[in-house]
Image (spheres, rainbow, N blue to C red):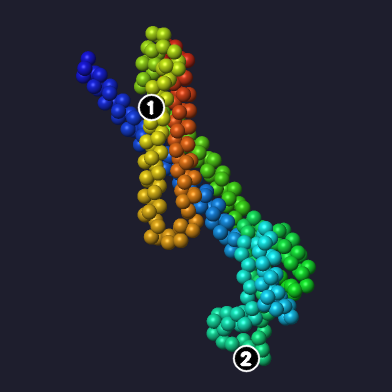
Amino acid sequence: MGKRKTFNLRRRGLQLVTLCISTTMVLTLLGLVVLSVLMARNLQKSLKENVEISVILGDTVTANEGKALGQMIEAEDYAREVEYISKEDALEMAKEEMGIDPSEFAGGNPFASELTVKIEADYANADSLEHIVEGLLQDEKVVDVAYTKDEIESMNRILEPVSIALLALAALLIFICYTLISNSVQLSIYSRRFSIHTMKLVGASWGFIRKPFVKQAVIVGLISAVFTCLILGGIGYAIKPYLPHIEEIVTWHELAITAVCVFAFGFVIMVLCTLLSVNKFLRMTAGELYKI
C-alpha cells in the first residue's frame, strides 16, 4: 500500500513537472509574439516620428521672427520638435556635406533660413501632411513647404499590411497556445478521472472536487510564467550585444506589458482549461470513463 502511494505521488510529481515544462514553452512562444507586436508598433512609431517637413522662410524674415514662428508651430498638436536653421547654419551644413563652399559658385549664400519640423507619428500620413502644409503656407513669412511625399506614402503602404499581418499572426498563435495548454491539462487530469468519479460517488460537491485542481493550475501557471519571464530576459540579454539600439525599440514599458500578458495568460488559460477538463469528467458516467 505504501509503495503504491509513493508511486502515485512520484507519477503525479512527474506529471506536474511535465505540465510546467510544456506550459513554459508555450508561454515563451506567446511572450515572444507579444514582444514582437510591441516592437513592431514602436518601430513603426519611430519611423513615422522621423518624418520631417522643411518650412522655407522669406529673405526678409529675421532670426527672431523665424524663432517666434517656430514656437507657434511647436505649440500645434502635429509638431513634435521644431528647429530653426539660419542661412549661415544651412551654408555651414552644406559645406560639411559637400566638401566645398556653394557660395563660391552662386556668388553668395544660396540658402534661405528654414524651420525643420518633426511630425508626431499620428500625423505622418499624406492627408494630414497636406492639411498641415496648407495651414503653414497661409503665413506670409513662409515661402514654401517641402517634404518627401512619395517616401511617406510608400512607408505607410508597407507598414499598414505588416501591422495587420502581425496582429493576425498574434491571434492565431494565441489560439494555438490555448490549444496546446488545453491538451496538456487534459492529459494531466485524464489520469485522475477515476479519482474524480470516486469523489463524486461519495457525495463530494463539484466545487470541492474542482478546488485542488484549480489550486494546482494556479501554481503551475504562476511557476511557468516566472520561468517564461526569466527565459525572455535571458534572450534579450543574449541578443543585446548584436542589436545595440534595441533599447530604443524595447523599453521597460514593453517588457512590463509582456510580463503582465505572460502572467495573465498563464493564470487565465490554466484555470480555464482546468475547469473545462474537470467539468468534462464530472459529467461522465462510469461507463463513459472506461470508453475514453
Viewer-side residue, 91 vs 174: 91
Q: Secondary structure at mark 1?
A: helix
The disc placed on residue 95 is none
211 lies above or below 55: above
- Judge whether residue 150 can be spotted in this image: no
Identify the residue at image location x=67%, y=91%. 107
148 lies above or below 164: below
Residue 186 is drawn in which quadrant?
Answer: top left
The amino acid sitting under disc 1 is Gln
The percent position of residue 63, horizontal first and vertical second, equals 67, 77
Identify the residue at image location x=63%, y=88%. 103
Residue that mark 1 sits on: 216
**Left or right placement of residue 106 versus residue 177 in this view:** right
* Numbered circles on residues, count: 2
The amino acid sitting under disc 2 is Glu
**Left or right placement of residue 17 versus residue 258 in this view:** left
Give the position of the N terminus as an image quadrant. top left
- Judge whether residue 222 can be spotted in this image: yes
Residue that mark 2 sits on: 104
The percent position of residue 292, horizontal first and vertical second, equals 42, 19
> Which mark sits nearer the N-terminus, 2 or 1?
2
Q: What's the distance in space between the residues labelled 2 and 1, CA to CA?
A: 81 Å
Viewer-side residue, 113 vs 276: 113
39 lies above or below 118: above
Q: Secondary structure at mark 2?
A: helix
Residue 194 is drawn in which quadrant?
Answer: top left
The percent position of residue 57, horizontal first and vertical second, equals 71, 75
Q: Residues within 10 Å of mark 2 (few under 14, many from 20)?
A: few
